[in-house]
Image: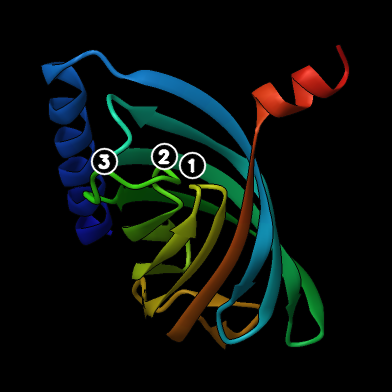
Amino acid sequence: MMNVRTAITILSVFFLSVFAKAQYTMHKMISVGYTYQNQSFGEIGGKLLFLKNDDVIYRLGGSALMGSANSQFAIMPKLQADVLLNFEKNVDFYHSYYFLVGAEGTNKYLAPKVGVSLFGILDLTGGYAFPIGNARLNGKKMEGLNINFTLNIPTVFIHDMFN
């Protein structure tokens, strides 16, 4: 349990120090997706996107993973932090793709991940999940390959659709 607290503290200090240096704009997003972690899970949640320019984007999010583990329905809370990078300059179609580096954690596992993001809206990531202690989900250990496919919908688009 101490390792989880240490990791959360380090991530918090890192992101707070980054945001304290300059003014960042914040955008809210709704996220829906699919996660494979020894089982298939649907995901729904929200994210906050922070950016000063569109070369480096920071995202913090929380969601619920819902699926079946050992033939029983299960829900896991998930927190995640991502950094999206694209330093390509003088392109006609500004920053259509980003390289993504991040980490996600639930009450059952921690998973560093890497991947790509199209416009910061459509993400495809992969990583490896490490179990937290002896935690199990309906008797199943959450360890191994971690794959995520996520659609991030900015709330501005939703608001504009109905006005």
CA distance for labels 3 and 2: 14 Å
What is the CA distance from the residue labelled 3 to the residue labelled 1? 17 Å
| Residue 75 in sight here | no
Where does the image place residue 48, in percent across and percent down from the top left?
48, 31
- Dots 1, 2 in contact, CB < 8 A: yes
Cα separation between marks 1 and 2 = 4 Å
Q: Residue furthest right?
A: 162
Q: Residue at x 60, y 34 (%)?
A: 29
Q: In the figure, residue 110 lies in which quadrant? A: bottom left
Q: How many marks?
A: 3
Residue 111 in the image, given as x and y percentages of width and height: 36, 69
Disc 3 is placed on an element classified as strand
CB within 8 Å, label 3 to label 2? no
Q: Is residue 161 visible?
A: yes
* Residue at which label 3 appears: 56
Residue named by callout 1: 61
> Which label is found at residue 60?
2
**Mark 1 residue type:** Gly
- Residue 121 or 133: which is nearer the viewer? 121
Badge 1 marks a residue whose secondary structure is strand
The N terminus: image quadrant: bottom left
Q: Amino acid at mark 2?
A: Leu
Where, quadrant-wise, is the C terminus in this rendering?
A: top right
Which is nearer the eye, 126 or 108? 126
